[in-house]
Image (cartoon, grey):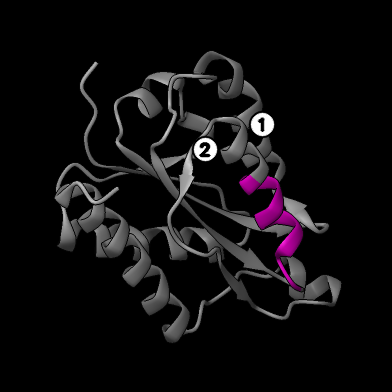
Amino acid sequence: MSCSGLLIVWHSRTGAAQQLARAAWHGAREAGEGVRLLAASRARPADFMAAAGYLFVCPENLGAMSGAMKEMFDRCYYPLLGALNGRPCAVIIAAGSDGIGAAAQVARIATGWRLRTVAESLIVNLGAQKPEEIMAAKQVPPASLAAAFKLGGQLAAGIGLGIY
């Protein structure tokens, strides 16, 4: 099966991860072709097989990746085991505290799939600590959206040029 382009798989509960995924998508579209933005709930093994690289975007929930993103990995992991070896990936985490646990979880799954991490995880700490802040709709700062835009562009350009 021929594969091309970047697949951006995201989940968001309060809007922050979705904003970051869309910013990355815009950056990727500006830099390359064949970019897809896909909600984690809709991602299927065939979507991964059709892409040349991946950007995973999700929130940190209770120090881990969101349950919906984990469910996507649970559903797709074994059907794709051994099929994605060497393809590039990166991670964006919308965090309320540090995001390290969520990024580490995604990195472990990427390692199991034998993906090649080509960029340091982008962790956007929004500092939501109180219950009302945690559940509130988020507005991601422009500098963080710009960083996501840049990461999406770099991944798409690298895939398009055959660097990854």
Front in this rendered view, residue 133 or 104: 104
Q: Is 158 colored magenta in this rendering?
A: no
Residue that carries the numbered disc 2 in the rendered image: 40
Q: Splitting the image into 4 quarters, where does residue 81 fall?
A: top right
**Residue at x 52%, y 65% (from the top left corner):** 120
Front in this rendered view, residue 82 or 151: 82
Distance from Cα at disc 2 to Cα at disc 1: 8 Å
Residue that carries the numbered disc 1 in the rendered image: 71
Which type of secondary structure does the marked residue at label 2 adopt?
Answer: helix
**Residue at x 38%, y 19% (from the top left corner):** 46
Q: Amino acid at mark 1?
A: Glu
Residue 161 appears anywhere in the view: yes
Q: Is 103 colored magenta in this rendering?
A: yes
Q: Position of residue 147 (x, y in %)?
A: 41, 76
Q: Is residue 17 left or right of residue 4?
A: right
Q: Position of residue 91 (x, y in %)?
A: 52, 55
**Residue at x 55%, y 30% (from the top left corner):** 113
Residue interval drawn in magenta: 98-107
Q: Is residue 15 above or below residue 162?
A: below
Q: Position of residue 128 (x, y in %)?
A: 74, 77
Classify 10 Å Cα crowding around label 2: few (below 14), some (14-19), many (20 and above): many
Q: Main secondary structure of the magenta part?
A: helix
Would you say the residues marked 2 and 1 are in contact, meaning their CB atoms lie under 8 Å apart? yes
Q: Amino acid at mark 2?
A: Ala
Residue 15 appears anywhere in the view: no
